[in-house]
Amino acid sequence: MDTAHKNLSWTLTLLLLTGVLCNEWKVQYKQLEVCAVKGSFAVIPCSFYYPNAAKVQSVKWTHERNNIYTGPFIFDSGPRLRVVDLKIFVPNKNENETMKEGDSVNLTCINACDSSALTWFKNGEVINKGPGLYFSNISSTDSGNYTCSLKTQPGVTSRIININVEYGPKNTSVSVRPSMEVRAGSDITLLCSSDANPAVKNYTWFKMGHGNEIVGNGSKLHFREIHPRDGGQFLCRVSNKHGSQKSAIVSIKVKAYSSSLTRNVLIIATVAALLVGTTVIAIRRLNKKRSALRTSQETDDIQNPVYVNWPMFENNQPQQENHGEGKTTELIYASVDFSTNIKLEMQPQEDSHDDRDDVIYSTVCRAPQ
């Protein structure tokens, strides 16, 4: 082939290739800007065209930082992908600032790609949709962990923001163990409880009456072996940095010692005294019998009545003189009775007052003139 034919051949080939590359091979993108939330998925649509006689063997994607030509494509400027975070914050408030019951609070979730396709969660439960969450009068029940997420992809969430609503004491009450009515000598405990955030710091117990006397501090008021005078009306007052509250009054009634118990004690004491007395009497009788037996063995029989006649002379004259003058003599009669049960002097003195049979009777009579 001569030089002219060679040049013509190369020219035709170049023209054919130029027509193919410029008119039949191309790539098109429907979106030149693609936005996606971090952690979600993104779709970048594209269309490419090639000659009917050609056969596509592979399709590849590349990033601008490693844009190296490796095949017959003609590279065009591709779409731009932007990755953003879901952001949640509290406008006009520091996150570390204390939120008090009654405050107004606004939560905002920002999705730079699409702010309308958002869902709010509290402690994992769906509570609202949209970019904002507003509390006009926040309460303790609103405390919890809040997040926002993509409506189409609930698994893609923002960071957690914790709302901790503080408040003063409420629902303060007193409970009594074992009960508000007990017997004297029992142990009893009064417990004070309250709902507060932060927790109650100070507890004060009052006994109602003259001056409402302060009777204790702390969440418990304990009586050991309670006395009837300890009974009465009680309440507790609690406080934290946001305020204070008093409980309702509880009445403690202390029953006096049981009358049946006292009666039983008296019966036992009486029975014991009777037993002791009976034992003493039995012992004394036994000793008395033993003593009487010894007396009967150691003494002889003593004769009963002994009569004595004794003449009395007047003017202290001798007996002979009165007989001589023939005057009448005055006689004195005496009778003495000795009991056969009389005891020896050695008998114990404690029995003498009981032995009425041992008394000695004597009668002295003056004879008539």
Image: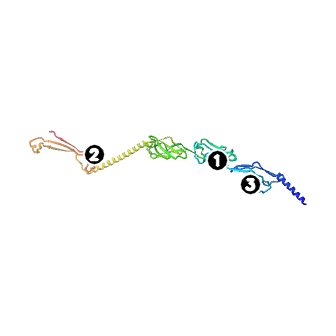
- Tell which circle, 2 or 3, labels the residue nearer the N-terminal end: 3
Mark 2 surroundings within 10 Å by alpha-carbon count, few (fewer than 14), some (14 through 19), many (20 or more): few
- Asked if residue 256 is positioned above or below residue 70 in the image, the reply reads above
Q: Say which amino acid is labelled 2.
A: His
2 or 1: mark nearer the eye: 1
Mark 1 surroundings within 10 Å by alpha-carbon count, few (fewer than 14), some (14 through 19), many (20 or more): many
Q: Say which amino acid is labelled 3.
A: Glu
Q: Which type of secondary structure does the marked residue at label 1 adopt? A: strand
The disc label shown at residue 88, or none: 1
Q: Which residue is mark 3?
A: 64
| Position in image of residue 83 (x %, y %) | 70, 50
- How far apart marks 1 and 3 lie (CA) works out to 32 Å
Q: Residue at x 14, y 43 (%)?
A: 311
Q: Which residue is mark 2?
A: 353
Return the residue nearer the eye: 2 or 148: 2
Mark 3 surroundings within 10 Å by alpha-carbon count, few (fewer than 14), some (14 through 19), many (20 or more): few
| Position in image of residue 58 (x %, y %) | 78, 55
2 or 3: mark nearer the eye: 3
Q: Residue at x 27, y 45 (%)?
A: 353
Return the residue nearer the eye: 317 or 141: 141
Q: Is residue 358 left or right of residue 194?
A: left
